[in-house]
Structures are given as C-alpha cells and as structure tokens.
Image (cartoon, rainbow, N blue to C red):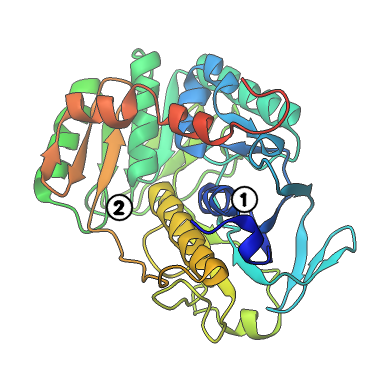
C-alpha cells in the first residue's frame, strides 16, 4: 500500500450506519477523511434482533455505539434531510460537499426486527417491553412466511415451547425466492416438529392492533377461518429509505423506490456517488450482501484514491440463505447444497454473527 504522504486524503461521506455503511466507513478510515452520519446512537445488529426479543440478555450484545467504529474519521449523529449528488444537508443545517458520497440508508422494516430508536437506552427499553408482551402471550400470530417469519417462529418455540405459534401468509409456500425445494422440505419438517402451525395460500386481513403489543387478536382468512392470538408480528414490508433524495439522485430511483446502480455500485448517471444495501437495486435485501457491497465500494474508492488497482464490478451472490430456527435448528442453502440444523447452528444460529461485528467496532474509548 502507498504511504499516506504520497496522495491527498479526500473526504468520504457515508450516509447511514447499517451493515453496508459501517463496512464501507471502516475500510476507508485509513485512506480518507471519513464522516459517518446516522440519526441513532448505536449500530443495531438486526440479524440478532429476534434473539434479543426472546432472550433479553442478548440486549447487551446487539448494540454497538458508532463512536467505537472509526479511529481517524468522525461520527455525526444527525439525519440527512436532502442529498442531490453534490451537496448533503443535515437536520442541523450543516451542509457537506464530499469528494465521494456513499448512500447506505437501507430500508425500514417493522419493529422489533428492526429497531430505529435514536438513543440506546430507549431502544433497549422498547425491546424489554416487547419481550414482556411476548412472555405473557399464550398464542402468537406471525404474518409473513419469509425468512423473518420463519426465524421468529423458531426463536419463540426454542425459548417458549409451550406457546402456540401460527404463521400465516397469502403465498402458497414458505420462503419465496430462488431456493431449492429440498430447503423448504427441511424447514417444513423442523417447523412441524416444533409444533408451528402454517396457514398458507389464503389472504388475511391484518389485525387492527399494533404489532408487538398485547391485544385480543381475531382475524379471518380469505377462506373464512378465524385466527386468534394474544400478540402478532408483522414479518414483511421492506421499504427502501430514499425519501431524502433530491434532483438527479431522486430521478435515479426505479418504480419501487430503489436506486439504480451500475456494476461498480455507482448511482445511475453519477461518477462519485455510490449506493449499497437495501436501498440499491444491485441484489437481494440481506445483511450479508450489504456488507459485501460496502467492502467492494470501499476497495473501489481506495483504488481511485491511491491509484493502485482497478475498480471492480459487484457480482450478485447466488441463491444463498441461512435460516436458523432457534440456536440449534434451521436449514440453509449454500453453493454446495442444502444444509441442516448442525451446520446452520455453527454458521449463525448459536452466536448470530455477534463476534464478527464486535470485532469491527474496536476503535474509540470504552471499547471492550
């Protein structure tokens, strides 16, 4: 690597401290003047949010203060209210004109799969309150049979095996997407063994009560059946966070609200503006893919700064997914085939990848 004195340190602004944003900011900290902007106090390891819901001891393991991420760069706790490709305006009124802009504001998703409270204490308190609601509920309704709903069902049955858990979805099958039938068969087998009830293939009127709150839930399916529960969770509804974009950046959104990017993850029509993770149209909305994109654009920006190497194209990942059903259960699809509970527990289920992110947040005062 070239020494720091042989090239200027340009400014890089990373908007959003999710999986893609933290990886990009961390990887550029040594070659650029990095500013990370996020309205919350700490990164939430959302991959483990369901685990923290069922086992509150995990609340001490899923939050990482942003002040611990960068050794040289700075963290600004603020919200971006406008970005047009040339200038970024913060809620405080501060205006930034970086040499490189990385958009990584991700997506919204219903609580408690994602926690967006601005301060750490409030986030923990809200999750503790949600745990108390779940603990006292005898019947649980999960609307959505994708990976989020399946994981939550597995977590609840692992820690509260006596609870009656129902997964309902209008789709005729669990886990939509380009996955092998053997994967669904293995998940079906384990869900049946856990005693999870599946109600698929019939539309469902959503409960009027707020998700994750104690209420007498009674809803009907399109077939006329009644589903009753003491609490329900919305396990669907990803929406890209792009409403702050203006000008050419706003015009680069597709009909779903995602930013169109090229092979190097540059926003359509832009040379030094990149978009990664759930807000971009490069790949599926998954934390692992956002992390890989953050690392790729960091390597590309590093090449542009140092003059060493050539920017590379992002290669969308093949159909790979790991679906834990509690710490010791679950199934996954890897490049070499479908994996069962033992492999899934080792890859993700037991530790929920916490060590990986703990190692990333190794800078700043108060580190463990």
Q: Nearer the viewer, residue 180 or 266?
A: 266
Density class for disc 2 (Cα within 10 Å; few <14, some 14-19, many ≥20) is some
* 204 left or right, relative to 366: left
The image's mark for residue 202 is: 2
Helix or strand or loop: what does disc 1 sit on? loop
* 195 left or right, relative to 288: left
Q: Nearer the viewer, residue 302 or 293?
A: 302
The image's mark for residue 29 is: 1
Identify which residue is drawn at 90% across, 63% down: 93
Please say if 55 is above or below 1.
above
Q: Nearer the viewer, residue 141 or 76?
A: 76
Please say if 354 is above or below 275.
above
Residue 192 seen in this snapshot: no
- Residue 216 position within the rendered picture, expressed as x and y whole percent measured from the top left: 55, 29
Identify which residue is drawn at 84% across, 59% down: 91
- Residue 242 position within the rendered picture, expressed as x and y whole percent measured from the top left: 62, 67
* 204 left or right, relative to 189: right
Identify which residue is drawn at 57% across, 83% down: 270
The image's mark for residue 235 is: none
């Amino acid at each position: 690597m070239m020494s720091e004195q042989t090239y200027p340190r340009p400014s890089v602004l990373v908007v959003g401290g999710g999986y893609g944003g933290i990886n990009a900011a961390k990887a550029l900290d040594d070659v650029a003047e990095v500013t990370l902007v996020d309205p919350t106090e700490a990164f939430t390891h959302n991959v483990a949010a369901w685990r923290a819901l069922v086992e509150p001891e995990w609340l001490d393991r899923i939050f990482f203060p942003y002040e611990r991420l960068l050794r040289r760069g700075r963290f600004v706790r603020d919200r971006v209210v406008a970005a047009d490709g040339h200038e970024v305006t913060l809620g405080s009124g501060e205006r930034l004109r970086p040499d490189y802009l990385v958009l990584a504001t991700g997506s919204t998703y219903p609580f408690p799969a994602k926690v967006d409270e601005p301060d750490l204490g409030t986030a923990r308190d809200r999750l503790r309150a949600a745990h108390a609601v779940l603990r006292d509920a005898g019947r649980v309704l999960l609307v959505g049979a994708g990976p989020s709903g399946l994981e939550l069902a597995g977590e609840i049955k692992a820690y509260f095996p006596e609870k009656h858990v129902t997964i309902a979805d209008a789709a005729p099958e669990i886990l939509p997407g380009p996955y092998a039938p053997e994967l669904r068969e293995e998940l079906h087998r384990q869900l049946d063994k856990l005693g999870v009830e599946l109600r698929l293939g019939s539309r469902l009127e959503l409960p009027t009560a707020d998700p994750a709150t104690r209420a007498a839930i009674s809803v009907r399916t399109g077939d006329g059946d009644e589903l009753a529960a003491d609490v329900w969770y919305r396990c669907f509804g990803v929406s890209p966070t792009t409403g702050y974009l203006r000008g050419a950046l706003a015009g680069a959104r597709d009909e779903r609200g995602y930013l169109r990017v090229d092979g190097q993850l540059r926003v359509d029509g832009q040379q030094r503006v990149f978009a990664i993770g759930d807000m971009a149209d490069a790949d599926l909305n998954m934390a692992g893919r956002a992390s890989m994109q953050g690392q790729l654009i960091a390597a590309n920006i590093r090449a542009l700064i140092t003059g060493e190497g050539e920017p590379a194209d992002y290669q969308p990942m093949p159909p790979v997914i790991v679906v834990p059903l509690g710490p010791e259960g679950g199934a996954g699809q890897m490049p070499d085939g479908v994996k069962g509970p033992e492999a899934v527990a080792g890859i993700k289920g037991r530790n929920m990848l916490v060590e990986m992110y703990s190692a990333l947040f190794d800078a700043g005062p108060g580190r463990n």
